[in-house]
Image (cartoon, rainbow, N blue to C red):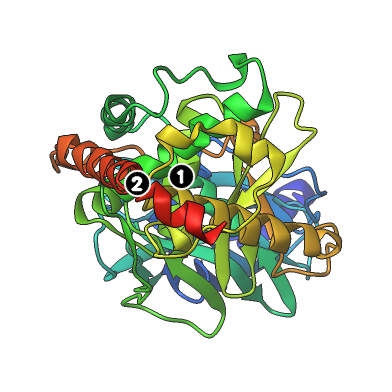
Amino acid sequence: MNMKRCVLSLVLCLLTAPALRADFTPIAGWDQQLFPSFLIGTAAMKSDAREVPVKYLGDPNGLLGVEVVAPQDDCEIEVTIEFSQYAETSQYLGRLPKQGETYTVFPKVKYRFDTLSQCSQATPSTVTYRVKLGGGTVQEKSATVTIRSIQDCPIKVLVGEEVIDTSFAFAVYVNEQHPFMDKLLREALDIGVVDSFIGYQAKSESEVLRQVYAIWDLLVARDVRYSSITTTAADSDQILSQNVRSLEDTINNQQANCVDGSVLLVTLLRKIDIESFLILVPGHCYAGFFLDAEHTKALAIETTLVGAEVEEPDELDPLLDESVDESLRGDYSWPSFVRALEEGTGKFVASQEKFQDETEVDYRIIDISAARKLGVLPIPHRGKEKFVHFDHSEYIAEEDADDAYEEEDYETEDDSEWEDVE
């Protein structure tokens, strides 16, 4: 009889016990924003080496999740995220260890990367969150997020009092496998500064530098010009971001801001096996590259000077002077190349201490090779844009005509006048 009463009492307690209520707060990206470029580029990124706090559960790189207080020790939790337009249904199953503690839980979201890569402008979307604790009922909440353009790159993010450096995301815009690159290199070979691109198989630093000049000469021949347009359609006080043109847009429309030009140059250099990198300083970006496979000597180049009308310095660095024969130095491209190397390398050397100081968050070197080893992938080319071919015969003929004109002027000088002066 006593046993029956005990069982009955237990059943009554279970029936009358309050169900666990999943009171939670949705987490919707950074400041209610998601960047497709960051999501695609980091999808295969290796886990961060830093230790993840014990109150952080699930995907260590997650951006969609919930914040929830554990109602009891070792409490089961089930978190489901519905984001049908941009992701498949994603779920996390686990346990909250300690009663009263607040945990952040991020399911591994199964993003639809093809769809994200097609986001050409900022657009709103709804994310639905469902949370179940223990044997309680499912609670549901929704949040609106802004999906940024694929061309918007997050540089740094303020989360609470912590500044998260996301500048490595610029590496996703460097795409060595872009189908336009082989076509551009073919054009460069047609111009004739070099007869092949062999990267570090070259016998000397001067030969490596000549290949870099051949790329620069190509961009000048294509009349790529500096354009400072960087406007984005969405903004945030917590996120510093930069609009980056696609490679095909920069190539076909012949316009490039400091980031666009640097990304294109670095992409082409990596395509010919010359290791290169992006250099970030406050409000600006330029490019750098190594003259040798061992990375013992680096130069930097100010990409905003591509196509600029500048005068060639009176004296050349010996390495520069021997790298390109005078007959191959373009009247338009050579002076700007020399000046771009001088300015870029000068700034690069002057800022070395700041690049090595982790507290200088606005000074960063984005090593593309290192980023690839960490799993940072380039945004795949899925556009329908066709490559716009350029006929460089006119550019070559114009350079040859200028050389012939100068030679003719020299040969028709009246030698007797020079003799009189002497």
Tell me the element at label 1. Answer: helix
- 49 over 97 or under it: above or below: above
Q: Earlier in the sequence, mark 2 or mark 1?
A: 2
> In percent of the image, x 60 and y 52: which residue is there?
341
Q: Locate the C terminus by quadrant.
A: bottom right
- Would residue 311 be found to the left or right of residue 94 on screen? left
- Which residue is depicted at the point 67% across and 32% down? 291
Establish if 38 lies above or below 407. Answer: below
- Callout 2–callout 1 Cβ contact below 8 Å: yes
Q: Quadrant of residue 297?
A: top right
Label 2 CA crowd tier, 10 Å (few <14, some 14–19, many 20+)? many
The image shows residue 132, relative to residue 367, as above or below, that is: below
Q: Nearer the viewer, residue 367 or 338?
A: 338
Residue 153, x across and y down, in percent? 46, 61
Q: On screen, 157 above or below 187?
A: below
Q: Secondary structure at mark 2?
A: helix
The answer to whether residue 367 of the structure is visible from this angle is yes
Q: Quadrant of residue 397?
A: top left
Q: In the figure, residue 138 lies in which quadrant?
A: bottom left
Instruction: Please report the residue visible at 68 percent of the width from the left and 55 percent of the height from the top.
Output: 345
Q: Amino acid at mark 1?
A: Leu
The residue tagged 2 is 219
For disc 1, the marked residue is 265
Q: Nearer the viewer, residue 181 or 73?
A: 181
Could you tell me the amino acid type at mark 2?
Leu
Asked whether 2 or 9 is in front, the reply is 9
Specify whether 277 is left or right of 395: right
Q: Position of residue 129 (x, y in %)?
A: 43, 63
Between marks 2 and 1, how big is the CA–CA gap? 9 Å
Q: Is residue 19 visible?
A: no
- Which residue: 25% across, 56% down? 254
